[in-house]
Image (cartoon, coloured by chain):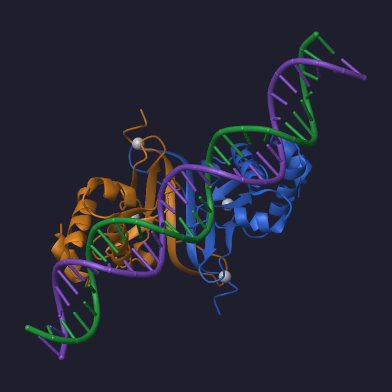
Chain colours: A blue, B orange, C purple, D green
DNA sequence: ATAATCTTTGCAATCGAGTTGCACTAAAAG
DNA sequence: CTTTTAGTGCAACTCGATTGCAAAGATTAT
C-alpha cells in the first residue's frame, strides 16, 4: 500500500496540507466518499478546498468518481497502476439499504461489444442491491 | 410499436393530457431525455407536472432513468415486456462529444458475478465514449 | 534576501436540477 | 348533482455543486 506522499508524487500532484489529509481520508475508507462525507470527517477544512482538491485528484487520476444515483457524487482512490482508461474499468456496488458504495475490483468486467464504430473511453457502472451485510 | 394509450393501459397508468404528450415525446426520441429536454420540447407544460409525470412513469415501469454523469437524470421508455428487474438490464451509451445518451438494447450484458451473499436488484450501467456519428 | 509571480485556501455568494406546498381544475365515485 | 379523489400550474424552496475574490502560502526571478 502506497502512502499519500508516494501516490501524489507518482501522479505528479503537488503535496499540500489539504491534499494530504483528503487523500489519507479516502485511503482509510472502504466505501467511496461524497464531498459531504469528507467535509464531515475533516471538520476544519473548507468545503470548496476539498471540492477543488477532488477535482485536481480526478484530473490527475489519483481518484475516480462514481455516480451511484444517490444524488451525491462519490469518490474512491484509484487502484495502483490505474490509468482510468477502459482497461481499468470495474463495477461499483451501491447498497440500497445501507448506502455504501464501493469498487468491485475483484469482479471481472467482460469485454463490452459496442455497436459498430463506437469508441469506449470510460464508464460509470453501478450495480445496485443488497450488500452482504444487509442481505440477511 | 405500441401507442401511448396502449402502453399506459398495460402499465395501469391513467391517461391524461400531460402524460400522453410526455410519453409521446419520449417515444419519438432516439436519445434519452432530461427533464429540461422535455420541458423545452413541450413549451406549454409545466416543469413540475412533467416531473411528477416522470415519477409516476418510473414507478409504474413505463420508463426507466439513467444517471449518465451529465448532471441531469435522463429518461427512456422501457422496452416492451420490460419489468425493470435484473433480467431487463442493459447498458447505456453516453457520447462525450454530442451528449446523446441511449439504451443499448442490443448489446448483451453478461451475468454479473457479485461477491458472496450480495443481491442484485437493479443497475445503472453507463458506458461513455464516442458514438458512431462522432467517432470520425 | 527581496520582490514579483503563481498556486492554494477560506469564505461567501451563486447556480441549477430537483422537489414540494398549495390552490385550482378536472375526473371519478357516490 | 354533490362529494371525493387525482392531476395540474405556479411559486417557493432545498441542497449539492460551483465560482469570485481576497488573503495566505509557495515558487521563481532579480
Ligand atoms: Mn471504482
Ligand atoms: Mn435504458
Ligand atoms: Zn448494505
Ligand atoms: Zn456523439
Q: Is residue A34 visible?
A: no
A98 or B116: nearer the eye?
A: A98
Q: Is residue A79 left or right of residue C30?
A: right
Say whether residue B115 is left or right of residue A121: right
Q: Residue at x 57, y 70 (%)?
A: A98
Residue B130 drawn above or below residue A71: above
* Residue B74 in picture, x, y percent from top left: 36, 52
* The N terminus of chain B, quarter of image: bottom left
Tally of numbered tags: 0
Q: Nearer the viewer, residue A91 or A5?
A: A5
Horizontal placement of A136 versus C11: left or right? Answer: left
Quadrant into which the C terminus of chain B falls: top left
Residue at 56% in and 72% down: B117
Percent x, y for residue B2? 15, 60
Residue in the foreground of this view, choosing between B100 and B91: B100
The quadrant in which residue A38 appears is bottom right
Amino acid at each position: 500500500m502506497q502512502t499519500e506522499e508516494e501516490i501524489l508524487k507518482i501522479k505528479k500532484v503537488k503535496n499540500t496540507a489539504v491534499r494530504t489529509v483528503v487523500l489519507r481520508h479516502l485511503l482509510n475508507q472502504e466505501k467511496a466518499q461524497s464531498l459531504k462525507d469528507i467535509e464531515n470527517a475533516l471538520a476544519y477544512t473548507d468545503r470548496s478546498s476539498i471540492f477543488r482538491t477532488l477535482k485536481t485528484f480526478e484530473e490527475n487520476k489519483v481518484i475516480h468518481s462514481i455516480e451511484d444515483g444517490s444524488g451525491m457524487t462519490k469518490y474512491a482512490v484509484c487502484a495502483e497502476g490505474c490509468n482510468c482508461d477502459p482497461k481499468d474499468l470495474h463495477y461499483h456496488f451501491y447498497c440500497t439499504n445501507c448506502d455504501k458504495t464501493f469498487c468491485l475490483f475483484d469482479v471481472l468486467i467482460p469485454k463490452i461489444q459496442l455497436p459498430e464504430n463506437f469508441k469506449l473511453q470510460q464508464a460509470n457502472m453501478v450495480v445496485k442491491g443488497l450488500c452482504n451485510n444487509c442481505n440477511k
